[in-house]
Amino acid sequence: MSNLETIIVPRVRDLGDGFQVRRALPAAERRMVGPFVFLDQMGPTSFAPGSGLDVRPHPHIGLATVTWLLEGEILHRDSLGYVQTIRPGEVNWMTAGRGIVHSERSDTQQREQASSLYGLQCWVALPQADEECEPDFTHQKASELSTLMLDGAHIILVAGSFMGMQSSLPTRSPLVYAQLTLQPSAKFLLPTEYTEQALYIVSGEIDCGIDGVHSAGCLLVTRTGARMEIRGGSQGAIIMLLGGELLDGPRTMAWNFVSSSEERIRQASDDWLHQRFATVPEETEFIPLPDALKR
C-alpha cells in the first residue's frame, strides 16, 4: 500500500521583477495539512544592486505566519511596532488574531549590492477560540531552536513539537514545522506523530521506496498512520516537515484573511478598504484590497 495520499507539484507565480514563488498550499488536491493553509517557496532569486524585496504593508486575520529563510535577509515591520531582520536559521512567528498589518522588504544595506533571497513562508490557521486573540510577534535566533542529530540526518525544530523536542513559540494548536537535512543516501523513518503530515522537498531528491523518487519542489502528503522510510539522493536533500492535528472545522481563505466565518472575512475586507486597520510605523504605502473582495 502506498504511504502517500497526495503529491502536489506547486504552480509557479511571478510577483514581478523576476521574483517567483512556488505555491504548494492551498492546492486543488489539498487545501490544508493539519492547520497549515498556505505554503510558498520564495526564490531562489537574485537582486541586482539597487533592487530588492518590496512587499508593501498588508493585513492578516485569523492566522499565524512563519518565515524560514535559507538565503538572504528580510526586514519585517508591523503595526505592533516590531522591526526585525530575519536571517537564515531564525524564525519570525507573527500571530494575526483579530488583525495585524506588516511589510517585508530588503533593507537599505542589502540594496547597495547584489543580494539573494530563498526561503519559505507558511500560514497556520488558528483554532476558533483564538481567531480573535490579540496579535503578537515572536522572533527566535538560531541558537534558541531545538535540534536533533541522527545517523546522516539533522533536524531543526522551527515550531511545535517533534521527536521529543518542543518549541516555545505560541503555536496554539498541536503541529510540527521542522527542517530535515539528509546526507547522501542517509535514511530517515518518518514518525507518525500527527494525523496529517507532509514533506516539502526544498532541494535534492528523496527515495520513498514503493512510492518512488521525488525531486525538489514537490509536496508529499503522507497517508494517516503511514510509517514511511525515506532516503536522501546522491546530493542529499533538504526537506520541510509540516503538519498537525485537524482543526475544529473548515476555514475560508480570501486574500490574506483566514477565518471560520465568511462574515468575518467580509468585515476584515471592509475594514481594510476603509483603512480601519492599524498602520505600520514609518510606512506610507499599502497593498490595496483586491477588487474581488470589494462589496
Image (cartoon, rainbow, N blue to C red):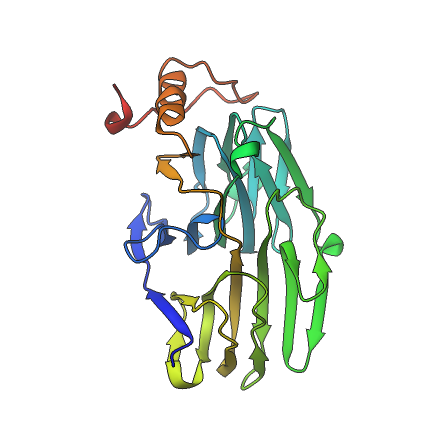
Looking at this view, is 10 or 104 the one in front? 10
User: How far from the left and from the top, in percent, is residue 261?
Assistant: 40, 30
Q: Is residue 136 above or below residue 220?
A: above
Q: Quadrant of residue 176?
A: bottom right
- Residue 45 visible, this orientation: no
Q: Is residue 42 left or right of residue 239?
A: left
Looking at this view, is 58 or 252 the one in front? 252
Q: Residue at x 50, y 54 (%)?
A: 119
Looking at this view, is 218 or 242 the one in front? 242
Q: Residue at x 24, y 28 (%)?
A: 292
Q: Is residue 33 above or below residue 239?
A: above
- Residue 141 visible, this orientation: yes
Q: Quadrant of residue 33?
A: bottom left
Q: Residue at x 52, y 19 (%)?
A: 279
User: How far from the left and from the top, in percent, is residue 91?
Assistant: 63, 48
Q: Quadrant of the C terminus?
A: top left
Give the number of callouts: 0
Q: Quadrant of the N terminus?
A: bottom left
User: How far from the left and from the top, in percent, is residue 17?
Assistant: 33, 45
- Name, please, the residue furthest toward the right: 143
Q: Quadrant of residue 77?
A: top right
User: How far from the left and from the top, in percent, is residue 16?
Assistant: 31, 43
